[in-house]
Amino acid sequence: MHATQFSNHTALFQLPIRPSVNDALTPMPFRWLLSLTLLLCLLNGCGTYNMEEVRLAFEDGNFEGALAYLDENPPKKSKLPYLFERGLVAQYANRFEESNRAFENAEITAEDLYTKSISREVVSLLTSDTVRSYPGTRYERLLVHYYRAFNYIYLNLPDEALVECRRAGRLLQYYADEDATYNFAGAAFIAYLSGILYEWTGDWNDAYIAYRQAEAGYQRYTEQFGIPLPEDIGYALVRLARLLDFEEEALRYAQLYGEPRPRPPRSGELILIYESGFVPQKVEKNVFLPILKTDRFEDDDEEEEKKKMRRFADQVVKRRHHHYKEIEVEYLLRVAIPAYTSNRPQLAGVEARVEDIQVPGVLVEDIEEIAIATFASEQGTILLRTVVRGLVKYLAFRRANKEGELAGRLVNLFNVATERADTRSWETLPNQIFLVRMRLPAGTHDVTLSFLNGENQPVRTETLHDVSIRANGMTFLNYRTFE
């Protein structure tokens, strides 16, 4: 478990180049062995830390131990996932400035990696996607701003927290401009949190805009993920429209969502963010696709062969769920692709209670659903690229085999050894995020959290002592469980 408290002030494809005449002068199989050795060295350079060690330290609440392990095992490659992990672990260890430095480096790295290296694209066709730059998913890059905003909340730097809200908004707009079909995963939660933070600083106009964006975002969430609009957003729209003298809008929102509850004098708000479980991990899945005896996809012209390879790869992908007679099949092409399986935690909800005041947590972000939906939208591209790579390896084997049996065996061994799926991701993210917004009298309170299972039944409780609430202010709490 993890809890942090802060009380605020008021307020595309390229095939390998064929050997030249000079290359042909290099004795076989020495040339193959040398090339394969160099490529294996490149591939082995991608070694990284063991995330199982980090996750175990997380579950024990040993965040300092997790940080020490990450520092002792920096990655040689795949820097971005490491920075994601380090930023989140540092926040849980209450090292907020250190966390922000890691997340800032992650943002810079992700931006640099967005334009992919052509040389690594070529090598990935010969080896695996693990040698390609990992730029992070859209939702991973977006959630960096959520965690950075909370770091600034804990550091009592509200203006900097609002900067993260604006940067998240610009990133979302960039995604929308780049891809008209983007489903805005993460947008609703970020907008909701932004509305709360703008209210925290007394910026009613920007708070109103953010809540309107959250309203639209959760309407999309309801359609795609079944996550309903939090009741509080409707009430906030009514309240802020009146503060801003938007009479028609206030009337319309009041008719839609009802009247907000009156705010008692000398009271403040508790904003509790509860994160549960771990996001699903990517795993490797083997797919076998048939190459038929009647297939012809080689060509003497290199450019024409590239075109044929792409067309043939698409044809092979379509054979995935078809059955062929053994007599028709020349070769079963094995390719490794990433896959997700659900990893729902035991604890799937929360209720907060202070004396006779009890407020349930509202699901505001389902990262598992978003991760799986994002991957599903990309799966076709990943599979096609993977099949092209498999065909390139298969052709290399056939050509090497013609030059000598030993060369053919070496290439086949290399192909088997390097066929790996890209399973990189931000693994310490929570599975789901809930939010409790609770109005309390000013003063110091003990807050009892009841954690719920999938049937909405309490499993266990935890009491957070001496939570300070200021009149007309907001107090932020962060809590994480791992069951």
Image (cartoon, rainbow, N blue to C red):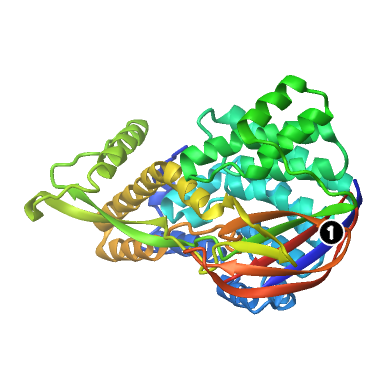
Q: Percent from the top left, x then y, of residue 145?
A: 72, 48
Seen in the picture, residue 216 relative to 35 is either above or below; the reply is above
Disc 1 designates what residue? 154
Q: Going by the image, does 31 lie left or right of 298? A: right
Residue lying at the far top in this picture: please name it. Answer: 248
**Residue at point 76% right, 52% down?**
148
Mark 1 surroundings within 10 Å by alpha-carbon count, few (fewer than 14), some (14 through 19), many (20 or more): many
| Residue type, mark 1 in image | Tyr
Q: Nearer the viewer, residue 213 or 473?
A: 473
Could you tell whether 86 is left or right of 130 in the image? right
User: Mark 1: which secondary structure?
Assistant: helix
- x%, y% of residue 260? 72, 40
Horizontal and vertical percent for residue 54? Answer: 62, 73
Vertical placement of residue 133 versus 404, above or below: above
- In the rendered view, would you say 467 is above or below 224? below
Q: Quadrant of the C terminus?
A: bottom right
Asked if residue 419 lies left or right of residue 278, the reply is left
Between 456 and 44, the one lying in front of the other is 456
Task: State the image quarter where residue 151 is shown.
Answer: bottom right
Viewer-side residue, 43 vs 266: 266
Quadrant showing the N terminus: bottom right
Can the viewer see residue 210 in this picture? no
Observer-nearest of 237 and 298: 237
Instruction: Identify which residue is drawn at 53% across, 46% down.
Output: 227
